[in-house]
Image (spheres, rainbow, N blue to C red):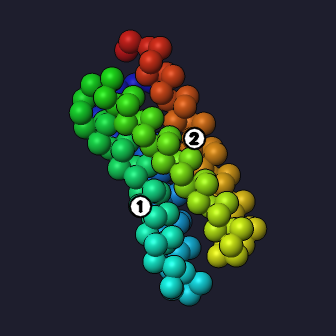
Amino acid sequence: MGKVNRFEDLEVWQKGMQLAEDIFFITRNEQFAREYGIKDQIIRASISISNNISEGFEYDNRKDFIKFLRYSKGSTGEVRNMVVYLKRVGLISNEVHDKLTNDAVILSKQLFAFINYLKNNNN
């Protein structure tokens, strides 16, 4: 992997931002009109993914970056859990659940691989 100069160039940041954007627009439908707490929680968890990637990147040292990537991975798990909940209580369809879950699983795997790369390479 070559030197990355901006967090916006990281695929994990891009996918995290896309997941947060998807969740934001999904929660704008009328089913969420009275579900302020749930809506707020999933939006916060989803934007936390890319926020932590960008914050860790800006510390400009590997140890802190890895720590913040782990936080992002944890937030990805929180989003997945909330997506299951939203499906179970009927706020999202099976199709939306499957898409969001798939996107979150892929992102979680990419974060895991990126963390391992950073831990095992001294470039």
Q: Nearer the viewer, mark 1 or mark 2?
A: 1
Q: Quadrant of the C terminus?
A: top left
Residue in the picture at 51% in, 70% down? 38
In this view of the protein, which residue sits in the foreground, 13 or 88? 88
Q: Quadrant of residue 52?
A: top left
Along the polypeptide, which appears first: circle 1 or circle 2? 1
Residue under label 2, please give it. 108
Query: How far across and down, in percent of the image, does residue 64 sit?
Result: 31, 29
Taking the view exactly as shown, the residue that stands out farthest to the right is 94
Q: Are marks 1 and 2 in contact (CB under 8 Å)?
A: no
When the figure is inspected, residue 80 is found, relative to residue 33, above or below; the finding is: above
Q: Quadrant of residue 54?
A: top left
Crowding around mark 1 (Cα neighbors within 10 Å: few <14, some 14 to 19, many 20+) is: some
Crowding around mark 2 (Cα neighbors within 10 Å: few <14, some 14 to 19, many 20+) is: many
Residue under label 1, please give it. 44
Q: Helix, strand or loop at disc 2?
A: helix
Is residue 9 among the parts visible in the rendering?
A: no
Taking the view exactly as shown, the residue that stands out farthest to the left is 59
**Is residue 104 shown left or right of residue 69?**
right
Residue in the picture at 40% in, 52% down? 48
Q: Amino acid at mark 1?
A: Arg
Q: Amino acid at mark 2?
A: Ser
Q: Helix, strand or loop at disc 1?
A: helix
Residue in the picture at 49% in, 29% down? 114
